Image: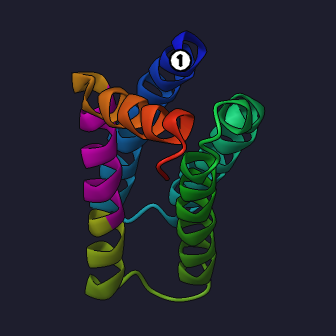
Amino acid sequence: MESVGAVLLTIQERLSLIVIKLQEYTCSSDSEHLAGTGEDLIVLADQVYDQLVEARHRVLSHTLREAGLGLWARATEIGQRDFCEADRTYFTEVHDVLTHLCEKIESGEYYSELAKLEAIRTKGVA
């Protein structure tokens, strides 16, 4: 589980920077940079995938990738039209979810719950 702690730290550090950029670009309605933020999430997901597979927790990588793909797709669509209030709501909601995830990792709660899940798996209960 120590390696999981290390990968979670990497995710938390990188994700905290991504959510800051996401908020900034949402406020400025910058679709090009919002697409880049989506790409940053996809790259992060790719970089931690193998470690999360080893820890039997690939769902986190998939979550990051899906969030990145959603951001990228929405931002690319906005590049062909005007930024509207529904877009701001979408990006704000994604920001809030990613911020919550980041906070749970930073507080240790995410790791703790993951350790509980691993204990259940090890005992064969799950």
Which residue does the image show at 53% across and 17% down from the upper left? 1
Can residue 20 be seen from the camera position used here?
A: yes
Residue 84 in the image: above or below residue 16: below
Estimate the x, y position of residue 49 in percent, counting from the top left: 72, 39
Estimate the x, y position of residue 48 in percent, counting from the top left: 68, 32
| Quarter occupied by residue 57 | top right
Could you tell whether 119 is left or right of 91 in the image? right
Magenta stretch holds residue 48:
no
Estimate the x, y position of residue 88 in percent, counting from the top left: 29, 74
Estimate the x, y position of residue 6 in percent, counting from the top left: 53, 13
Which residue does the image show at 44% across and 40% down from the upper left? 120
Q: Residues within 10 Å of mark 1 (few under 14, many from 20)?
A: few
Which residue does the image show at 66% across and 43% down from the upper left? 45
Tell me which secondary structure the magenta stretch mostly adopts.
helix
Residue 76 in the image: above or below residue 118: below
Which one is nearer the viewer's eye here, 35 or 57? 57
Could you tell whether 74 is left or right of 92 in the image? right
Q: Which residue is tagged 1?
A: 1
The magenta segment is: 94-105
Which one is nearer the viewer's eye here, 47 or 115? 115
Residue 120 in the image: above or below residue 96: above
| Quarter occupied by residue 43 | top right
User: Dot 1: what SS?
Assistant: loop
Number of marks in picture: 1
